[in-house]
Image: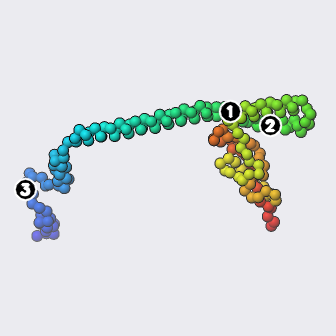
Amino acid sequence: MSSAEEENEDLKEADPIVEEGAEAETPSDEVGAEEVMAEEESEPPTPAEEVEKWKDLAARSQAEFDNYRKRMARERTEAVVYANRSLLEQLLPVIDNFEMGLKAAKDTEGDSSMILQGMAMVLNQLEDFLSGQGVEVIASDGLAFDPNQHEAIKQEASDEVPSGEVLYTLRRGYRLKERILRAANVVVSSGPEKEA
């Protein structure tokens, strides 16, 4: 006998004998038969169980609908509150330029100029308008640097201001309610100058 024939003989002995035309029973067939028998043995739900099932489904559906309604109301309120955000963001550079013009006029004309006083009044009106819309200036000078509200442009050494605090503001930042419209551009202190 060759080695291949011997292996075939060993395999026949290890496997159970299956008659021709009959299929071997597999473990999945056994599980399927057990499930069918278990379903036949289980009783249909009682009317009380059906009622409880539908009551639970109704309660869950009602809770989901309440959550949906609350979420929609919250989103609608936020949409109204923050509807002017884009307009206000576009107005901020205009205010920056107006402030620079006001500063330049003050440097050249002095405080007694009528044009300067008129520009100052217009700037006050703009700031009142922003305040009425819920816009606030982000405080920064002399405060600890906060990356959520401040954008550090550079660091400078300072003997008076501790490291990590804002030395001065280059461009003011603004907040609309709780959201940042624009971060303040600041210069941060690196502490006292180190000698080499």
Could you classify mark 2 by the number of other residues whose Cα lies within 10 Å: few (under 14), some (14-19), or many (20 or more)?
A: some
Which sits in the foreground, 23 or 172? 172
Residue 13 point in image, percent of width and height: 11, 66
**Is label 2 in a helix, a strand or a loop?**
helix
Residue 57, compared with residue 151, is above or below; it is: above
Residue 138 location, x and y as percent?
71, 44
Residue type at tag 3: Glu
Q: Is residue 165 visible?
A: yes
Q: Nearer the viewer, mark 1 or mark 2?
A: 1
Residue 195: which numbered mark, if any? none
Given residues 38 and 94, the one toward you in this image is: 38
- Label 1 sits on a secondary structure element that is loop
Q: Residue at x 77, y 51 (%)?
A: 142
User: Mark 3 vs mark 1: which is more N-terminal?
Assistant: 3
Residue type pointed to by label 1: Gln
Alpha carbons under labels 3 and 2: distance apart: 99 Å
Pick the front one: 47 or 170: 47
Pointer 3 or 2: first along the chain? 3
Mark 3, residues whose alpha carbon is within 10 Å: few (<14), some, or many (≥20)?
A: few
Q: Nearer the viewer, mark 3 or mark 2?
A: 2
Determine whether label 3 and label 1 are within 8 Å by CB. no
Secondary element type, mark 3: loop
Could you say which disc has been placed on residue 133 in the image? Answer: 1
Whole-Å distance between the Cαs marked 1 and 2? 20 Å
User: Looking at the picture, how far across and down is residue 106, in whole percent?
Assistant: 88, 37
Choose top left, top right, bottom left or bottom right for residue 4. Answer: bottom left
**Position of 26 compared to 80: left or right?**
left
Q: Residues under labels 3 and 1: Cα distance? A: 88 Å
Kindly identify the residue that appears in the image at 79 percent across and 64 percent down.
194
Q: Which residue is mark 2?
A: 99
Q: Nearer the viewer, residue 173 or 44?
A: 44
Q: Which residue is mark 3?
A: 19
